[in-house]
Image: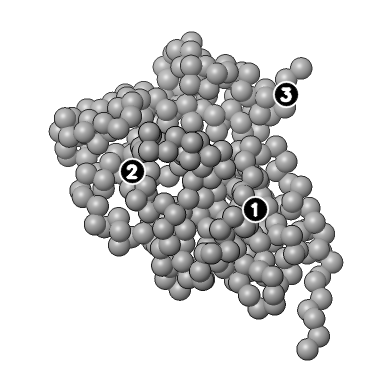
Amino acid sequence: MSRRRVPGSLERRFAGLARMLDGGAIEPEEPGNGDGDVAAGYLVVRASGASAARMAIAGAGRPKAEPEQIQLVMRAALPGYLPAGGVSLRLAECGLRAQPGPGPGRGGTVLLTVATGKLSISYGELRALMFRPVPLDRALQTLFAAAVAHLLVVADRLDPHGIRPYLTGLAELVLRTALRDELDRVDAMAARRRAAVEYIREHLADPGLSAERIADALFISRRRLYQLFDDGDGVSGRIRAQRIERAKELLGDPAHAGKGIGEISRQCGFTNAAHFSRTFRKLVDETPREFRDRVLGTAD
């Protein structure tokens, strides 16, 4: 049987994929180091990169440590024309690597890395599943493999700022579907916490967003709401952190480069630009303008 010839246009496209999005901050880890142990039909969720190293160092001393990124590792049917060395996409808060298997007709390994804080599923729900093989429904395997294959083919034609939420959404879909049975056994508090997080995200631009508003929307008491967020900075801290994350997205997006800092702050729910700048600097260690200049490469 003759070997399938790779179209020249695809060869050029895949040759450029490894160089695209050069300014990304994370790179999916190389296959190996246990990736080969992921059996077909299973998903493994693990801490990624430096986060994994910090968690290993922390050990039992910090059992509730939350990694900045998590990685989904699974076997998948990949296009036969992928380069033997694999293909990577690198972005600031997520990444994707597809590594073909060593022989013809064998499934490859896909590593999808996303920021933990971007998921509506809390790390507390995922912690018990870390490094545990989770069986995948065949329909989910097929959907995931197709999504990865299609993205790799057209990634160099897409806006990288649009790829980030796409990959995060893909991870969310896989996690929610693959872990549905496990998540369904979690008590009602976890479900309400997810609803609260989603409500916060949908109303970040509203300066009147408050614990009372969230509690009323979810038909729970404020005391119950505070219990949902007793593992961190509380409700106000979560709102503040999400607003700063949204500000970082807007400041780092070339499509919003013409907007002033004051306008960005209002879009994120801040009524005072000076307060926004102080809060941003406290959480990011840069002023909003310094962050924008660095990310967009506009600094003198």
Q: Position of residue 249 (x, y in %)?
A: 55, 33
Few, some or many residues within 10 Å of mark 3 (<14, 14–19, 20+): few
Which residue is denoted by mark 3 in the rendering? 298
Q: For this rendering, which residue is in front, 39 or 231? A: 39
Residue at screen point 45% across, 73% down: 138
Q: Position of residue 96 (x, y in %)?
A: 61, 52
Residue at screen point 65% across, 78% down: 105
Mark 2 or 3, closer to the camera = 2
**Residue type at mark 1?**
Glu
Residue at screen point 33% across, 60% down: 180
**Residue type at mark 3?**
Thr
In the picture, residue 198 is in which quadrant? top left
Does residue 135 appear in this view? yes
Q: What is the secondary structure assignment of the residue under circle 2?
A: helix
Q: Position of residue 179 (x, y in %)?
A: 36, 59
**Residue type at mark 2?**
Gly
Q: What is the secondary structure assignment of the residue under circle 1?
A: loop
Q: In the rendered view, tell whether residue 193 sits above or below residue 38.
A: above
Q: In the rendered view, tell whether residue 58 sits above or below residue 149.
A: above
Which residue is denoted by mark 2 in the rendering? 124
Residue at screen point 33% across, 29% down: 232
Residue 190 relative to residue 44: left or right: left
> The C terminus is located in which quarter?
top right
Q: Circles 2 and 1: CB distance less than 8 Å? A: no
Pick whichever of labels 2 and 1 is earlier in the sequence.
Answer: 1
Q: Circles 3 and 1: CB distance less than 8 Å? A: no
Mark 2 or 1, closer to the camera = 1
Residue 57 relative to residue 95: left or right: left
Mark 3 or 1, closer to the camera = 1
Which residue is denoted by mark 1 in the rendering? 30
